[in-house]
Amino acid sequence: MTLSTSELTFSQQRNTAPKSEAERAAILADPGFGDYFTDHTAVIDYKVDAEGQGGWSNARIEPYGPIAMDPAAAVLHYGQEIFEGLKAYRHADGSVWTFRPEANAARLNASARRLALPELAPELFIESLRQLVAIDRDWVPSGDGEALYLRPFMIATEAFLGVRPAREVSFRVIASPAGNYFGGELKPVSIWLSTGYARAGEGGTGEAKCGGNYAASLAAQLEAEAHGCKQVLFLDPFNDNAIEELGGMNIFFVFKDGRLVTPALNGHILHGVTRASVLQLAADRGMKVEERKITIDEWRDGVASGDITEAFACGTAAVLTPIGELKTADGVIASPGSGAGEVTMSIREQLLGIQTGAIEDLHGWLTRLA
Ligand SMILES: *Cc1c(COP(=O)(O)O)cnc(C)c1O
């Protein structure tokens, strides 16, 4: 039977052995990033029936725990998987809000189309977040810069080794309390320039948020770590070494004359929600924003001439992070300054302020979850 979205209501099976209040308090005192998970998970199943009709069913909240899956499940062999990432923020009055979830819902569906997975109604996506955060609301941290990181994902669960889109799929949401992504104080990060590896290419999956892109970035990530860097910058080697993005973050440059420049979405750059929000906030302040091609040569020359004064990376997990230096096999070729830039920090504070309810949400970006 095919169920339409509006017919789906969540059933709820409570975790009978949740973390104790003391255990939770200990975790929330130093949550780190991605190390701990809440007591529950949201799940919705998808199946294509004998008539070839696909539909979502069995929306539920269940205890967090291992997934029982057939060893032949398609996701384990062919990587048919997509994911999302967004945060739930606790406001001063105790209420819990999330940021632009409809953008994540739309992006999940764009990724689904690329990976031949089924689309999920945006209302159902947001309802799954609401259900999970409602039951696990005590896990939403309230410290400065802290939030509950929400990780929706979709996997091909059908046991079948032939290569075609799976007819059984599972959508899930897990949640993880999060402190500062890079740990400790906000220090500018060092970036490694990957020349041997590309993250994405024309017609590939670069624009989709899929696990495979991340798996493909790990060898470059190891190279970065071996050179003392935290993140990798990827270029488009077939397009004058145009700057694309980091393994999981978009990139911006602040110019001396007040311009803000970021690589244009070219079909293989991820459409970051943070990226779109930064562009809007910068335009609101009267900055001239440019989405265009920017090459590694322009970065190097811009820093040398003083035209480029700041560079930062951005994404949900780390918000805005100043880039300290760019290292390559030939040494440091660009260093936009060792401290955190003024513009970077100002936009970062404004964005965090909106997300945490300290600054008025003039764009209607917040949705209440609990
Ligand atoms: C998720 C992601 C981003 C950042 O997107 P946000 O919506 O801002 O969190 C940037 N690049 C890649 C490759 C990503 O996967």
Image (cartoon, rainbow, N blue to C red):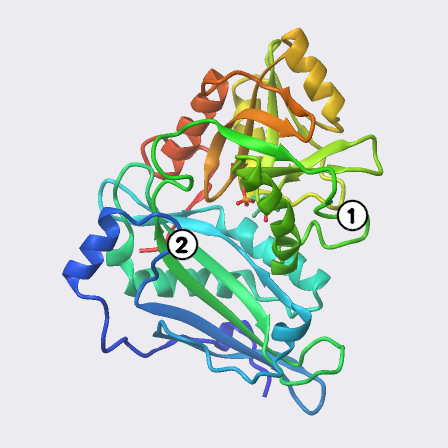
Q: Front-most of 357 and 228?
A: 228
Task: Please tell me whether residue 212 is drawn above or below residue 275 in the rendered image.
Answer: below
Q: Position of residue 297 (x, y in %)?
A: 75, 21
Please identify the quarter of the rendering in which residue 356 is found.
top left
Local crowd size for mark 2, using a 10 Å CA cut-off: few (<14), some (14–19), many (≥20): some
Does any portion of residue 289 appear in the rendered image?
no
Tell me the CA gap for discs 2 and 1. Answer: 29 Å
| Quadrant in which the N terminus is drawn | bottom right
Q: Residue 292, image x and y in percent?
A: 74, 28
Q: Secondary structure at mark 1?
A: loop
Tag 2 secondary structure: loop
- Badge number at residue 64: none
Q: Quadrant of ligand 1?
A: top right
Q: Position of residue 120 (x, y in %)?
A: 58, 66
* Residue drawn at point x = 45 percent, y = 21 percent: 340
- Residue underneath mark 2: 34
Ligand 1 closer than 8 Å to the CB at disc 1? no
Residue type pointed to by label 1: Gly
Asked whether, in this view, residue 91 is left or right of residue 111, the answer is: left
Out of 57 and 241, give the one closest to the viewer: 241
Instruction: Tell me the residue that label 1 is attached to.
Output: 201
Give the farthest residue toward the left.
Answer: 22
Residue drawn 46% across and 16% down? 342
> Could you tell me the amino acid type at mark 2?
Gly
- The residue located at (27%, 48%) in the rendering is 141
In the displayed orientation, state which residue is furthest to the bottom: 50
